[in-house]
Image (cartoon, helix red, strand yellow):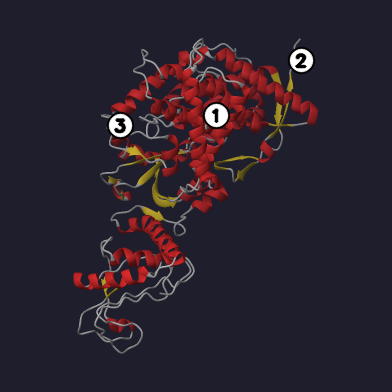
Amino acid sequence: LKLQPPLLGSNLFVFSANGCSTRGPALGCPAAARLELRHLNLLAIGTAIAHASGLCAPVGRDVASESFGHRRSAAGRCRVSLLVGFTRSCSLTSMGCAGRVLEELRGVLGGMTWRRLGGLLSGGSLCRLWWSQYGILLKRRLPYWSMGWPIIGHTPGILSMTLEGWSEKMVQGKPPAVLTNFLFTNTVLVSYQLYSQHIHSMELDGKLGSGCPPTALKLLGKSSVLTLPGGKGHQHHKRLRTKLLHSLAPKPCLEVLPEMSLEVRKMLDKLAEESARNGFASFDASGSHLAAKVSTLQITAGLSQDLQARIEDLVDTIVSGVVAAPVNLGHFSAFGRALAARRELQGIVTQLLKRPILDKRNILADLAKVTEGGEAFTMEEILDTIVTLLLAGKLTTADALPNLFVNLSQQPDWAAEVAQESLEFTSIESDSAALRVVLETLRVFPPIGAYRRMDKEKAIDLGEHGQIPAGCQFAVFLKTELAAMGDGFDPGRWTSDVVKSHGWLAFGGHQPHSCIGRSLALLELQVFARILCREYDFKALDPERIVKASMPINKCYRDGLRVTVTRKVRP
């Protein structure tokens, strides 16, 4: 047994049995079958042991020994599998031969050292990852595919261009369905039009499940409204979603309008003080803090500053774990740290449930008791829901706020229109200049440009574009549909008819998993826009969007978006 460096060996192994030696042209026929693994990398070790022990179904092709410069053996034939590009497999010619080989393997394993055992286990793991990536290519009628690098797929592209930039490049000039691999998962990128034609009805009928990455499934929890299957027949999801929509409806959101306005002014005053002191201020950190603060207004109805800051840190850690490799090494890996942060957040939620703040309306209190919106949630359902809402607030409004600031700074005419609007709201979604600017900002820079689903039982037919294999995730790509509405920044495009047809695409469109916090997000963004334009003079300084390793989903602004903010002098 000769080990080569991981992934750098010859990627070629020859399995010979019944005395078919590969050492030379002469045939040797010893009494016991011999197993030769020559020039074998760690990947091939895992495959060889799996097939020799009968753990995997054999796939291969009969190759005469003459192909390797040998004569055909009279004692039996040898099935040879070549590992070129990725591992295929090999099989034995008879059960008797397999038994003899297992005896030989027992002898080898009996003298196994810890170092060799570690190599075998590592090889098996690498082989499994390799097969999970490339095994799908054996399926029929696949869409156009681009699998990227072995094991890691296109993940390096996401880290260098962000998920937003990479996905745009991946679908540009390609068919409306593209099979690819990123974040260690095979996924078919599907255009929204193709989804509407072939998949949307299946989702409404409850035939699709969540396609979240393994890390997201683990961190969000099995009772999250994002991970539960929805649509017809899925009562668990319907019960949770109905109760949440009752707590996040427009009327409950408007009840926290005074507190929301106060938090917006605190944030802008802080930027004004920083601008006066340094000549500029950094927007991103303040915007992220505002998004987290507003999202907790309806989750806990008020927290201490120390606890609020701790929850923000925990949510940041969990977000980093969602896009990390699914490897739990405790505090030595991003996913391990995210799991630890979730456990700490669970402890905080448990303590809050013991002493909820009941003098204000809050989701946490509503979830824990029977209300007109539905039955009380279990502890697991409450924790998964709170984590989901906190993450959603972090990844949506926190990303939209700096884009909204820049657009208002670059569109003074629209900013002037927004400044004329009242701070009183009778309806969150009624037509206004602020709403149009917000919708156009979300169109140009959607916080979440796609969402994932899968059908675990059946392949999904995409017509002339092939089919999505059963159990394979697909991502509905929304950003191209939004970008196709037109070039440039034009809030005037959002007429009542356009709002009905495309207004909610940035929130997932009309499907069972559309954003449940839409009313809260729209209210927060409009309040921010109106207060900013009415009460402050502001400017974005060189707003260049760049790739940041700590935020691999969307691009962010250089230096945290430098801005100047000053309070307007009141007459």
The residue that mark 1 highlights is 397
The residue that mark 3 highlights is 204
Name above or below for residue 539 compared with residue 422.
below
Upstream in sequence: badge 2 or badge 3: 3
Contact flag, marks 2 and 3 (Cβ < 8 Å): no
Q: CA distance from mark 2 to mark 1?
A: 29 Å
| Disc number placed over residue 569 in the picture, else none | 2
Q: CA distance from mark 2 to mark 3?
A: 53 Å
Q: Residue at x 34, y 82 (%)?
A: 22
In terms of depth relative to the viewer, which is nearer, 19 or 395?
Answer: 19
From where the camera sits, is residue 118 visible? yes
- Tell me residue 332's x, y (percent): 55, 48
- Helix, strand or loop at label 1? It is helix
- Tell me residue 186's x, y (percent): 39, 50
Q: Residue at x 47, y 32 (%)?
A: 506
Identity of the amino acid at label 1?
Thr
Q: Residue at x 40, y 33 (%)?
A: 226
Q: CA distance from mark 1 to mark 3?
A: 27 Å
Identity of the amino acid at label 3?
Leu
Upstream in sequence: badge 1 or badge 3: 3
- Tell me residue 95's x, y (percent): 20, 69
In terms of depth relative to the viewer, which is nearer, 72 or 171?
Answer: 72
- Helix, strand or loop at label 3? It is helix
Q: Residue at x 28, y 33 (%)?
A: 206
